Image (cartoon, helix red, strand yellow):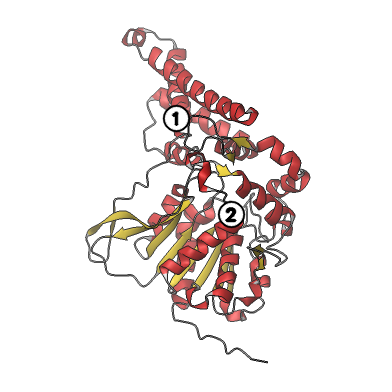
C-alpha cells in the first residue's frame, strides 16, 4: 500500500503543477489586464502556458504524426500504422506506405524501453521511410498493463525480439538504438542457434551499453554505486488506483525523467527560461523547436520493475552481455555463434549516456564473424540523441547505415558445420 500511495502522490504533484500552470495562464489572460503595462502579467501568463503544456505532456503517449512521405514517382504516398504482431507488453508495428513498391530494405527499428515511448524515434522513422520499409517495436506503458498479464524482464524482451524477427522473415535489417542494443545482439545470437533462417541480414547497434565498464558515465557510476536492495527501495513503486495496471510494481517514468533532467539541469533550466520569454514576447509557436523536442522528451512511460532491475543487475552490474554469459530460460546465449549477420556499431564522441567504447565492444564478442562482416563508426561531435535523431544522424550516420545495409542485402552462405 505504501508504494501505491507514493505513486499516487507523484501523479497528484504532476496534476497540481498542470493545474497551477493552467490557472496562471487563465488569470493573466483576462482582457482587462491587457491595459496594464506591468510585464509581470505577461511573464506569469507565459510561465503558466509553458508549465501547463509541460506537465500535461507527461501523461499522454504522443501520436506518430506521420501521414505521408514523398516517393521517387513524384507523388506523396499516405502512411498508415499497422500492428503486425500484438503482444501484452509491446507490439510490432509497420509503417505501410500506400501504393509504393517494396524498397528492398526491410528494417526493424528496435526502440528503447528506458522511460520514453517509441515515438521518441519519430524523426528516425521519418528519415528512413523514403528508402526503407520500416517496422518498429512499440512498447506499452506498464501502468496500463494489468497484473494478470504477468512479468516482463530482459529475457522476455529478448524473446519478444526473437518472435518479431521470426514474423518479419530472414531479409530483415535490425537497427537497435541505445538500451536494446545488448538485447538485440543476444536475440540475434539466440536465433543463430535456435532458428538460423530467421536471423537478420544486418545488425546495427547505435549507442548501446554492450560493455558498460568500457567507459564510465554518470549512468554506469550510479549503477555500480548502489546495491540492488537500495535501488529497489529508492525507485520501485506500485501503480496507483487510477490506471489499469493498479498494483503492478514499476519504475515510474516520472522518476526516470527526473534523473534524465538532473544530468543536464542547467541546460534544461535555460531552455525553459528562454521559452517563457519567447512566449511572453509572442515569438513562440506550437511547433517551434522547443515544443517539438520537449513534447516528446517529457512524454514518459513506466517500466516493469523486473525489467528495470534485471537490466541494472545483469547488464550493468553483472556484465552478462559484455562477458558473454547471458542466459534465456536457463540456456546460455553464445554471441560467438553469430557467423553470417553483418554487425555495425555507431557511437557519439560526446555521448554522456553510452560513452564511446561501450557499444563497439560488441565486435570483439562476435568471435565467429569474419572481419569483413564487422564495421564501426564514431561521430566525433555528436551526443547521445544526435546519433539517432539529430543532424549528425541525418547527414552522416544514416547514409552510412544504408550503405551498410545495401552491402549486406544478399543472403549469406550458411557455414558448413563440421560433424565430429
On the picture, is 130 further left or further right than 351?
Answer: left
Q: Which residue is drawn at 40% across and 12% down?
A: 27
Residue 321 percent location from the top left of the image:
68, 63
- Which dot marks residue 237? none
Whether residue 168 is visible, yes or no, is yes
Q: In which quarter of the image is residue 50?
A: top left
In this rendering, the answer to whether 189 lies above or below 236 is: below
Q: Residue at x 49, y 72 (%)?
A: 200
- Which dot marks residue 179? 2
Label 2: element kind = loop
In this rendering, the answer to whether 202 lies above or below 261 is: below
On the picture, is 157 further left or further right than 86?
Answer: right
Report if the CB atoms under discs 2 and 1 are less than 8 Å apart: no
Q: Which residue is drawn at 75% across and 39% down?
A: 230
Residue 344 percent location from the top left of the image:
56, 69
Residue 246 percent location from the top left of the image:
52, 35
Residue at far front of view: 148
Quarter occupied by the C terminus: bottom right
Q: Mark 2 Cα within 10 Å, few/some/many (few <14, many 20+)? A: many
Q: Earlier in the sequence, mark 2 or mark 1?
A: 1
Residue 54 percent location from the top left of the image:
47, 30
Q: Quadrant of residue 87?
A: bottom left
On the picture, is 287 further left or further right than 2?
Answer: left
Q: 328 or 348, which is in the foreground?
A: 328
Label 1: element kind = helix
What's the CA distance linking mark 2 and mark 1? Answer: 26 Å
Quarter occupied by the N terminus: top right
Q: 306 or 63, which is in the foreground?
A: 306
Whether residue 366 is visible, yes or no, is no
**What is the tally of numbered marks visible in this picture?**
2
- Which dot marks residue 56? 1
On the picture, is 409 further left or further right than 150?
Answer: left
Amino acid at each position: 500500500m505504501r508504494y501505491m500511495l507514493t505513486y499516487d502522490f507523484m501523479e497528484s504533484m504532476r496534476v497540481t503543477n498542470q493545474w497551477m500552470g493552467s490557472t496562471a495562464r487563465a488569470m493573466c489572460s483576462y482582457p482587462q489586464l491587457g491595459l496594464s503595462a506591468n510585464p509581470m502579467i505577461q511573464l506569469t501568463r507565459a510561465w503558466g502556458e509553458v508549465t501547463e503544456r509541460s506537465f500535461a505532456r507527461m501523461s499522454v503517449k504522443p501520436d506518430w504524426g506521420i501521414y505521408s512521405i514523398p516517393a521517387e514517382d513524384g507523388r506523396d504516398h499516405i502512411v498508415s500504422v499497422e500492428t503486425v504482431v500484438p503482444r501484452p507488453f509491446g507490439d510490432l508495428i509497420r509503417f505501410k506506405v500506400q501504393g509504393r513498391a517494396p524498397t528492398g530494405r526491410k528494417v526493424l527499428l528496435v526502440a528503447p524501453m528506458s522511460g520514453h515511448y517509441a515515438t521518441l524515434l519519430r524523426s528516425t522513422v521519418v528519415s528512413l521511410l523514403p528508402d526503407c520499409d520500416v517496422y518498429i517495436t512499440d512498447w506499452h506503458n506498464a501502468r496500463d498493463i494489468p497484473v494478470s498479464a504477468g512479468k516482463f524482464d530482459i529475457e522476455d524482451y529478448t524473446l519478444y525480439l526473437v518472435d518479431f524477427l521470426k514474423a518479419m522473415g530472414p531479409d530483415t535489417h535490425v537497427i537497435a538504438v541505445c538500451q536494446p542494443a545488448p538485447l538485440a545482439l543476444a536475440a540475434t545470437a539466440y536465433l543463430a542457434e535456435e532458428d538460423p533462417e530467421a536471423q537478420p541480414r544486418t545488425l546495427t547497434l547505435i549507442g548501446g551499453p554492450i560493455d558498460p565498464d568500457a567507459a564510465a558515465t554518470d549512468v554506469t557510476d550510479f549503477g555500480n554505486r548502489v546495491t540492488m536492495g537500495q535501488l529497489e527501495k529508492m525507485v520501485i513503486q506500485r501503480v496507483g488506483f487510477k490506471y489499469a495496471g493498479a498494483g503492478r510494481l514499476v519504475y515510474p517514468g516520472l522518476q526516470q525523467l527526473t534523473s534524465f533532467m538532473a544530468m543536464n539541469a542547467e541546460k534544461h533550466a535555460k531552455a525553459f527560461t528562454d521559452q517563457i520569454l519567447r512566449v511572453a514576447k509572442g515569438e513562440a509557436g506550437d511547433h517551434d523547436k522547443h515544443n517539438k523536442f520537449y513534447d516528446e522528451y517529457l512524454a514518459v512511460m513506466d517500466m516493469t520493475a523486473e525489467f528495470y532491475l534485471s537490466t541494472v543487475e545483469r547488464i550493468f552490474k553483472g556484465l552478462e552481455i559484455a562477458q558473454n554469459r547471458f542466459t534465456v530460460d536457463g540456456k546460455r546465449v553464445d554471441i560467438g555463434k553469430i557467423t553470417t549477420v553483418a554487425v555495425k556499431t555507431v557511437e557519439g564522441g560526446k555521448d554522456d549516456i553510452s560513452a564511446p567504447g561501450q557499444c563497439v565492444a560488441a565486435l570483439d564478442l562476435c568471435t565467429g564473424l569474419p572481419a569483413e562482416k564487422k564495421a564501426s563508426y564514431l561521430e566525433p561531435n555528436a551526443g547521445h540523441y544526435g546519433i539517432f535523431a539529430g543532424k549528425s544522424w541525418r547527414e552522416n550516420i544514416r547514409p552510412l547505415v544504408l550503405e551498410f545495409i545495401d552491402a549486406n542485402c544478399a543472403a549469406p552462405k550458411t557455414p558448413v558445420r563440421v560433424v565430429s
